[in-house]
């Protein structure tokens, strides 16, 4: 789960990390109060709040020197959509705009904390190349990427912090500030079960002080059950609506770019199903695992979820009955089809517990369903029908 930048900065403040004073605009009538609540003597920076990077490159971040320019920015973006290199062609809705006090910048740096799966720990990454795409920096100038591992207590030894500070050419006062920022970020990362904390850029102001100019936080969704305050900050408008609906119904769903909808029970079988579709030159429209203990109701919800994707031109249902009963799955499929007008071809493969009974239910339904016994034949058939 991601947070908006302004939400991330609220947590930064809680952990005593230096951020700019800001105000929030959710509707046009908020403009006057938002401008008056910050130091607007030299203007401000207006920022679109959406879960994507690259906002500045498409006009989503702007220096506004007057209230008129703020109003123009709000009119341009509020209620619209922003499209960046990190979004699809539809973009993401803009429901919030943040106004921030100006910061006099001398130098931009990069800093982040990540779950480092390769090293099996949390790592901190810093670089003198701030304000840039860190993947590009790592590819073109890897010598500018500095890395440190956090120990099991989420700490980095002070001597290692000093080595990093020295590499970044910090003076003694900046080194102390850097150490404090590292400590605060590490504690925030641990306390809130984060998977990513990024400050890009971490700046050196003209007065020499370090300042967190940007803030990005990703939260481990598996830990949200114990992070109720974070869960309250979830913005469903920034997520794929099908993926969000799937989460609400305890379904594992990921949108893809293809046109063959997949409904499978079990993650491994789902991956195998998508691979087999690809083998026959088809393109899966989604990953969808209804779970090993799928019920008729969950299958019905999953079926509706697939059909809500307008790109879907055919559906492959692949169910192996272990704990789950195939006859109940079959009834769930029929119920879902009857509740909607379905014009796309559907191929069903049922194997295992009560599979023969399930096949009889499907055959007697009077619906245009094609049954296959093998995954290969089922995949081949749906690809042929879609093409």
Image (tube, rainbow, N blue to C red):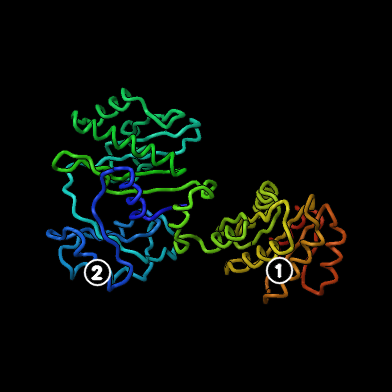
Image side of residue 239 versus residue 353, left or right: left
Secondary element under disc 2, as helix, strand or loop, is: helix
Q: x%, y% of residue 259?
A: 61, 63
Is 91 situated above or below 6? below
- Crowdedness of circle 1 by 10 Å Cα count: few (<14), some, many (20+)? some
For the C terminus, the image quarter is bottom right
Query: Which residue sits at x=41%, y=53%?
Result: 3
Q: Which residue is mark 2?
A: 31
Q: Earlier in the sequence, mark 1 or mark 2?
A: 2
Q: Is residue 16 above or below residue 99?
A: above
Give the vertical position of 49 relative to 150 (above or below).
below
Which quadrant of the view contains residue 60? bottom left
Between disc 1 and disc 2, the foreground one is 2
Q: Which structural element holds mark 1? A: loop
Task: Name the side, left or right, on which 74 lies relative to 259.
Answer: left
Foreground of the two, 85 or 226? 226
Q: CA distance from mark 1 to mark 2?
A: 52 Å
Residue 345's disc number: 1
> For the point 23% across and 71% down, which residue is it?
72
Residue 261 lies in quadrant: bottom right
Would you say the residues marked 1 and 2 are in contact, meaning their CB atoms lie under 8 Å apart?
Answer: no
For the residue pair 16 and 106, the one nearer the viewer reads as: 16
Task: Tell me residue 190's x, y (percent).
Answer: 44, 39
Q: Which numbered disc covers residue 317?
A: none
x, y (%) of residue 228? 48, 52
Who's the residue at 20% across and 40% down the image?
204
Toward the viewer: 38 or 363? Answer: 38
The image quarter containing residue 380 is bottom right
Mark 2 burial class by Cα count in 10 Å: few <14, some 14-19, many 20+? some
Determine if residue 60 is in view: no
**How many numbered discs, if any?**
2
- Residue 324 image position (x, y, % from top left): 78, 54
């Amino acid at each position: 789960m991601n947070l908006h930048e302004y939400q991330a900065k609220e947590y930064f403040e809680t952990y005593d990390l230096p951020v700019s004073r800001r105000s929030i605009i959710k509707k046009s009538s908020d403009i006057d109060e938002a401008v008056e609540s910050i130091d607007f003597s030299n203007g401000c920076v207006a920022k679109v709040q959406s879960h994507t990077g690259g906002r500045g490159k498409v006009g989503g971040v702007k220096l506004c020197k007057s209230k008129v320019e703020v109003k123009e920015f709000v009119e341009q973006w509020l209620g619209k959509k922003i499209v960046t290199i990190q979004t699809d062609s539809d973009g993401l809705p803009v429901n919030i705009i943040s106004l921030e006090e100006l910061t006099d910048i001398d130098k931009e740096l990069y800093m982040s904390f990540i779950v480092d799966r390769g090293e099996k720990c949390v790592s901190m990454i810093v670089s003198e190349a701030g304000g840039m795409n860190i993947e590009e920096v790592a590819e073109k100038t890897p010598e500018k990427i500095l890395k440190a591992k956090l120990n099991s207590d989420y700490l980095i030894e002070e001597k290692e912090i000093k080595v990093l500070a020295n590499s970044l050419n910090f003076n003694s006062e900046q080194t102390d500030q850097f150490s404090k920022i590292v400590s605060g970020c590490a504690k925030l990362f641990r306390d809130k079960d984060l998977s990513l904390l990024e400050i890009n850029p971490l700046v050196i102001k003209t007065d020499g002080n370090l300042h967190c100019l940007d803030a990005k936080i990703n939260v481990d969704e598996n830990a949200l059950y114990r992070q109720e305050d974070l869960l309250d900050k979830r913005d469903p408008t920034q997520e794929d609506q099908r993926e969000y609906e799937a989460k609400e119904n305890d379904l594992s769903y990921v949108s893809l770019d293809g046109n063959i909808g997949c409904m499978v029970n079990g993650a491994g079988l789902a991956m195998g199903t998508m691979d087999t579709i690809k083998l026959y030159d088809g393109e899966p429209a989604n990953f969808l695992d209804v779970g090993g203990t799928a019920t008729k109701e969950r299958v019905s919800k999953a079926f509706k979820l697939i059909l809500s994707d307008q790109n879907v031109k055919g559906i492959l249902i692949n169910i192996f009955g272990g704990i789950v009963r195939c006859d109940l799955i079959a009834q769930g499929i029929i119920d879902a089809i009857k509740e909607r007008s379905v014009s796309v071809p559907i191929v069903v493969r049922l194997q295992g517990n009560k599979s023969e009974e399930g096949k009889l239910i499907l055959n007697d339904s009077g619906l245009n369903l094609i049954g296959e016994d093998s995954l290969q034949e089922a995949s081949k058939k749906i690809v042929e029908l879609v093409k």
